[in-house]
Amino acid sequence: MDKLTTCIWYNYTAEEAANFYVSLFPGSRITRVQRTPADTPSQEAGAVIVVEFELLGQKFIGLNGGPQFQQSEAVSFVIHTDSQEETDKFWDAIVGNGGQESQCGWCKDKWGVNWQVTPKRLLELVFDNPDPAAGKRAMEAMFQMRKIDIATIERAAAGN
C-alpha cells in the first residue's frame, strides 16, 4: 500500500466519476471496487463504498460518502497540457460532460471536482519569460479567459 493516496469524497457517484476520469487519461485504470460487507447508516450491504483508480500513474480513492461534504475550489487538480488541441480535449470533456467553466483555465466537473487545464506554454510565457513586461502581458491576457487560448497568450506576450 502506498504511503499517500488522494481520497475524493462523492455523493454516491464515485464509480461513475472514476470511469469518466480513466476515459480521459491514457494508461489510466480502475484498480479496485470495494463494496460494503454490511449495512451502513447510508448504504445497504453490497453497495460500492470505495473505488480505487489510477490517473497518469497517480493513485486515487473515490469514497461514496454521501451528501455531507461538498467539493471546494480550495482543492483542484492541474492538467498540464502540451498543445491547444490537448487543452481543448480536456476542457471540452470536463465542461461538456455536465461541468462548468470558470476563469483562467479553471473548470469544475459534474461531480464538483475542480480542475485547472493549464498549457505548459502559458507557464513558460508568464513565469519563465526573460522579459517581465511580456510575462505581465501574458498574465493579463489569461485573466480575460475561461479556457486558455495559447495563440492569444503568445500574441499578448509579444505585444500584439
Image (spheres, rainbow, N blue to C red):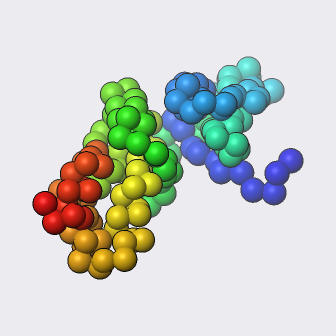
Q: Is residue 150 above or below residue 34?
A: below
Q: How many tags in the picture?
A: 0
Left or right position of 83 against 159: right
Relative to the observer, which residue lies in front, 88 or 20? 88
At horizontal 25% and vertical 71% (from top left) the residue drawn is 134
Q: Nearer the viewer, residue 160 or 68?
A: 160
Q: Is residue 152 left or right of 23 when viewed as pictured? A: left
Compared to 58, does 48 lie above or below? above
Give residue 126's position: percent from left, percent from top. 34, 68
Q: Residue at x 41, y 63 (%)?
A: 124
Answer left or right for 132 relative to 31: left
State the image coordinates of residue 18 (x, y, percent, origin top left).
59, 30
* Residue 112: quadrant of the picture: top left
Viewer-closest of 1 and 133: 133
Q: Residue at x 35, y 40 (%)?
A: 84
Image coordinates for residue 160, horizontal then vertical, percent: 13, 60
Farthest residue in the top direction? 46
- Does residue 54 sit above or below 16 in this rendering? below
Query: Is residue 94 among the parts visible in the rendering?
Result: no
